[in-house]
Amino acid sequence: MDILLIGGLWLDGTAWDAVTPVLDELGHRPRPLTLPAAPATTLDEQLAAVLAAVDAADGPVMVVAHSAHCTLGWLAADARPEKVASVALVGGFPQQDGAAYADFFEIRDGVMPFPGWGPFEGPESADLDESLRQQIAADAVPVPEPVARAVVRFTDPRRHDVPIAMVCAEYTPDQVRDWVAGGHAPELAHAKHVEYLDLDSGHWPMFSRPTELARLLAALA
């Protein structure tokens, strides 16, 4: 199966470099995506890049999305519910309709640069050694302001039929269930098929536990 891989904010397709060989060995066709990220790039343009990859696949695809870009993966399911066979959400869940996409950190000169490791101290980054931290920070791609501050809009209720696998990295499945029950993740609440999977890692398992993540994704596919 074609598996589209969308890294989170500040990550390009190289974030999956240690994951893709394992998916290849397990018989799948990984397609890591590097999203357009010029300062004027819009969320619609990033979604169009994802949809182009969905449409280029010979058959149904599995979309894997990480962190804040879980919303982007779910927007792809909303736009192509007949082509997206399933969505795996790693370390995040979709924003609700009408919410800001990812307006989390300071915007400078039209982009949201990587803010450093301070905001992520604790369980999110505890499994990253210093070399991985330096690598991620050095390769970080600033997020365009029109992406970060875009308003999320869903249009097709058929997205709720697309199966979701919640890959729970720095939190547990029970925590996510509590968030859903508390009304904090309405898109998950409305989805008809949600599976919760525990992955004992921090927020960036494609760097800290790539083999385990790849095997989990292959099993889902």
Image (tube, grey):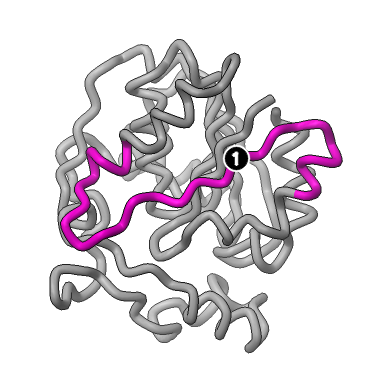
State the residue at coordinates (25%, 41%): 45
Across and down, in percent, residue 73 comes to: 42, 37
Across and down, in percent, residue 200 comes to: 71, 60
The vertical placement of 186 against 10, above or below, is above
Q: Quadrant of residue 116?
A: bottom left
Whether residue 181 is visible to the viewer of this picture, yes or no, is: no
Q: Quadrant of residue 48?
A: top left
What amino acid type should be assigned to the residue bearing mark 1?
A: Arg
State the residue at coordinates (25%, 70%): 112
Q: Nearer the viewer, residue 58 or 192?
A: 58
Q: Is residue 188 left or right of residue 134?
A: left
Q: Quadrant of the C terminus?
A: top right
Q: Quadrant of residue 105?
A: bottom left
Outermost residue on the right side: it is 25
Asked whether residue 45 is drawn in magenta, I would say: yes
Across and down, in percent, residue 185 comes to: 35, 40
The vertical placement of 87 against 177, above or below, is above
Q: Residues within 10 Å of mark 1 (few under 14, many from 20)?
A: some
Q: Which residues are magenta?
A: 21-47
Residue for badge 1: 31
Across and down, in percent, residue 199 comes to: 69, 53
State the residue at coordinates (58%, 60%): 14
State the residue at coordinates (38%, 79%): 119
Label 1, secondary structure: give it: strand
What is the count of numbered marks? 1
Q: Quadrant of the N terminus?
A: top right
The vertical placement of 56 against 107, above or below, is above
Q: Nearer the viewer, residue 174 or 139?
A: 139
